[in-house]
Amino acid sequence: MVFPRPPSESDLFLHSNFASRYARDSLPRFSMPEESMPKEAAYQNIHDELQLDAIPKLNLASFVTTSMEEECNKLIMESINKNYVDMDEYPITTDLHNRCVNMIARLFHAEIGEDENAIGAGTVGSSEAIMLAGLAFKKKWQNKRKAEGKPYDKPNLVTGSNVQVCWEKFARYFEVELREVEVREGYYVMDPAKAVQLVDENTICVAAILGSTYNGEFEDVKLLNDLLLQKNKQTGWETPIHVDAASGGFIAPFLYPELEWDFRLPLVKSINVSGHKYGLVYAGIGWVIWRTKDDLPEDLVFHINYLGADQPTFTLNFSKGSSQIIAQYYQLIRLGQEGYLSIMENCRENAMVLKKDLEKSGRFNILSKDNGVPVVAFSLKDRSQYDEYKISEMLRRHGWIVPAYPMPPAAQHINVLRVVIRAEFSRTLAERLAFDIHNVLHELEKLPPPTMINNTEEVKKALVDNGVKKNSMDTQKEIIGQESNKRQKIMAA
């Protein structure tokens, strides 16, 4: 029997973490340890465990930026200890925030003068931005109904069933009925005509998506605006539009400048966009912009003065870091419109390279559109030998994370693989991914036919039914398979 050696004085002077007792002890999981450990040991152990995470650049399930320039990284570290809410103490940081709001609002054609400040706020992400925009719509609708002496206890919101889960959260958390327009096979975004049919006097807004989570497609905001104008004129209602431009808000102004989706349309009253997606900033920054000051009810804005000066605030959070706001300002002035256009063009071209390669194979249906977020969404034409989930699983062996998931209800019989092409995804990586996909297909074709696999499973089931227990490996495989499917569906969001 080997007995553990008690800590010796040499442990305190031995520089190698791997020769110390900290390489033998498991890291705490449930309770804080009673004793301290050297900073080098803490770092090394955590660092080593994190190596088991996926490589962020190869995580093609995510829209979130994973790489920024070293100069911006320096700014982030220099400001990581600043609490943004201390506006009186950090006035320059506050000013940089306001500059971002002004630049983004003008990018979206907000109705503001040359030297006028726009109405908007930085948020932790688009989810918080959507909550704030939704609250503004709800409060404005309630105030109007109260003034008219009408009931104001049954607000509703119209969206497509392809919306991101944060819209469902808003409806549930803030007690708003969510009316969803179902997508259908071949048409995977909200139909504007069907959306307008669901609108009634209790509708606080219709939410359109500029870049569907499922296939990157832009919804037709212009058609929605025109149809809703007609209905408002017929009914006397004033139902507005919110545009969820989380993914497409930093793409459309550069790649599709003639596309009318923003404040050029009279019924669009607010827009959210994710700075941490195609705004090219690390995770943790979103923006919400209102058309005019009148579109943000004043009774939702809080004024605080216990930090040294009167400060208006309209957020769901209070304390938050300043780094991402500063990083956003860096990208806006560093890249300018020229830089953003060049990056978005590269993303689109790399998406087209992957798409054409997949089409050439003859094995996939392409469900994404050429005009939209640079996403390639595709499904198998023939699932008799293997399905999209198996391809996703096999690609992980090559380091790629490519999610597989079902389409929304009414089209959920269709499974999709989705590749998000981000700024840091080069042509070389696009070609390598296509090569690996073809290799995976060849590997899968060499596997036994599904009938043989099914027969094997039937034999196992018969053995279990007759009292023969599954071995631990079989049980483990089942659990891993079930958890993998759950994760793949979650990654669709």
Image (tube, rainbow, N blue to C red):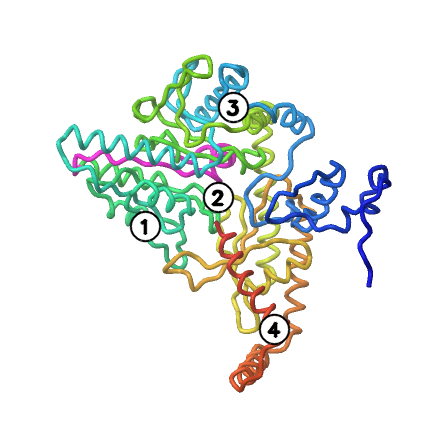
Percent coordinates x, y for residue 352 in the rendering: 58, 48
The image quadrant where one finds the N terminus is bottom right
Q: Which mark is residue 84?
A: 3
Between marks 2 and 1 in the image, the one whose residue lies nearer the viewer: 1
Can you name the residue that lies furthest to the bottom here? 466
Q: Residue beneath label 1, please?
A: 180
Name the amino acid type tagged 4: Asp
Question: Callout 3: few (<14), some (14-19), or many (20+) C-alpha neighbours within 10 Å?
Answer: many
Observer-nearest of 68 and 155 = 155
Name the amino acid type tagged 1: Glu
The residue range painted magenta reads 234-260
Label 1 to label 3: alpha-carbon separation: 37 Å
Question: Callout 2: few (<14), some (14-19), or many (20+) C-alpha neighbours within 10 Å?
Answer: many
Label 3 to label 4: alpha-carbon separation: 51 Å
Describe the element under mark 1 as helix, strand or loop: strand
Percent coordinates x, y for residue 102 in the rendering: 46, 21
Question: Callout 1: few (<14), some (14-19), or many (20+) C-alpha neighbours within 10 Å?
Answer: some
Question: Callout 4: few (<14), some (14-19), or many (20+) C-alpha neighbours within 10 Å?
Answer: few
Residue 238 falls inside the magenta stretch = yes
Q: Residue beneath label 4, please?
A: 474
Between marks 4 and 2 in the image, the one whose residue lies nearer the viewer: 4
